[in-house]
Image: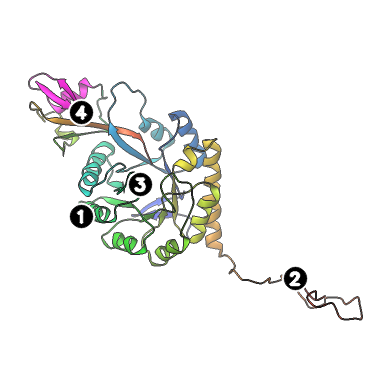
């Protein structure tokens, strides 16, 4: 199925979760410094493994960068 | 002023908070952290770039400094609140440097959205440190809704114009019951020192250090300036006066001539 990840379309397997997407993106296991919102709602890290992605959802995967 | 800075019950021995924006690379940031001797640094959240390697968090962890996430880039209370929640997930901290900007060109805070976001986040259990204008009324309103500190600007972000309205800042300082952290406008060491001399509890500084020709040296200069300013504030400066006030006693001044000294040049003047 197709989902939007950080503004770009991406194919993920049926049954994909936030957790599986994060792993595909190469985020280390702890996920420290990374946060995820799906359709504007924050997905707590504890829910990543179960949070199923549905076709067409907008996923924002954010990480720490330099900033004042 | 005690040696330690207390924000929301947390103790800091350094009164310099470093903004990490603008450093050319992580190596220079790491060295600047060491010479700034800071204990807390701001970071921002942006879209993950799977290609990039080496996290800023590794640099901050190595330096042993606390992370203060910001909501930079937010123009509405709603976006700032969402970003604060994302930051809480990412960094496991309730602390948030709240920025709600009203204008791209000035990067000045949007007072209405800022206050709304601050109130919401305080209610949700965040320790809110809002970047605000130097408006004493807004600063008081932010304190009233429960912010843990107020962070007025000296001048616009990255402008390096120092403290443009020390009178407004003084009014904020006279009234504030929470720490006051000068958050923007520092251009060089004397600006940071002045902030502390006026009574600010701390300075948050990014561009003045990160964009200096030698960021590591400037980090040390501003570190020392903040310490000097805090010492001077605690020591209590002399009042300003329009005329000289000699420090050498007049009593016992010798007289070498019998005729009176010319007007305007009295022999008894002492330096």
Q: Which residue is mark 3?
A: B107
- Label 4 to label 1: alpha-carbon separation: 32 Å
Q: Secondary structure at mark 1?
A: helix
Q: Is residue B67 magenta?
A: no
Which one is in front in this view, the residue at disc 3 or the one at disc 2? 3
Secondary-structure class at tag 3: loop
Q: Is residue A60 above or below residue B110?
A: above
Q: Quadrant of residue A62?
A: top left
Report whether mark 2 lies on the same chain as mark 1: yes
Residue in view at x 16 percent, y 26 percent: A4
Q: Read off the residue under disc 1.
A: B123
Residue A33: tell me if it is visible: no
Does A30 appear above or below B51?
A: below
Alpha carbon of mark 3 to alpha carbon of mark 4: how far? Answer: 25 Å
Measure the alpha-carbon separation of dots 1 and 3. 26 Å
Q: Nearer the viewer, mark 1 or mark 3?
A: 3
Q: Quadrant of the C terminus of chain B?
A: bottom right
**Residue behind mark 4:** A7
Whole-number angstrom distance, CA of label 2 to CA of label 1: 59 Å
Provide the chain ID for the residue under circle 2.
B
């Amino acid at each position: 199925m197709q989902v939007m990840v950080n503004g770009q379309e991406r194919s993920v397997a049926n049954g994909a979760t936030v957790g599986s997407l994060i792993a595909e993106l190469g985020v280390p296991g702890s996920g420290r410094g990374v946060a995820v919102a799906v359709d504007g709602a924050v997905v707590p890290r504890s829910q990543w493994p179960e949070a199923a992605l549905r076709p067409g959802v907008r996923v924002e995967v954010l990480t720490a960068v330099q900033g004042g | 002023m005690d040696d330690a800075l207390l924000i929301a019950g947390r103790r800091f021995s350094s009164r310099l908070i470093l903004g990490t924006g603008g450093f050319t690379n992580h190596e220079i940031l790491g060295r600047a952290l060491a010479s700034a001797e800071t204990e807390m640094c701001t970071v921002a959240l942006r879209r993950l770039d799977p290609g990039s390697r080496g996290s800023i968090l590794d640099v901050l962890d190595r330096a042993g400094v606390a992370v203060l996430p910001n909501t930079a880039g937010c123009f509405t209370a709603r976006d700032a609140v969402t970003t604060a929640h994302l930051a809480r997930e990412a960094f496991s901290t309730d602390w948030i440097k709240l920025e709600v900007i009203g204008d791209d060109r000035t990067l000045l805070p949007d007072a209405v959205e800022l206050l709304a976001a601050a109130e919401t986040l305080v209610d949700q259990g965040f320790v809110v440190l809002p970047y605000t204008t130097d408006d004493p009324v807004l600063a008081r309103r932010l304190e009233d809704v429960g912010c843990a500190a107020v962070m007025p600007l000296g001048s616009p972000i990255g402008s390096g114009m120092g403290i443009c309205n020390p009178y407004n800042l003084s009014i904020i300082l006279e009234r504030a019951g929470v720490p006051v952290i000068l958050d923007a406008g520092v251009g060089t060491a004397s600006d940071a020192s002045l902030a502390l001399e006026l009574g600010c509890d701390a300075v948050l500084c990014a561009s003045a250090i990160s964009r200096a020709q030698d960021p590591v040296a400037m980090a040390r200069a501003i570190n020392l300036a903040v310490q000097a300013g805090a010492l001077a504030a605690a020591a209590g400066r002399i009042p300003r006066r329009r005329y000289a006030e000699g420090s050498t006693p007049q009593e016992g001044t010798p007289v070498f001539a019998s005729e009176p000294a010319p007007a305007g040049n009295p022999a008894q003047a002492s330096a």
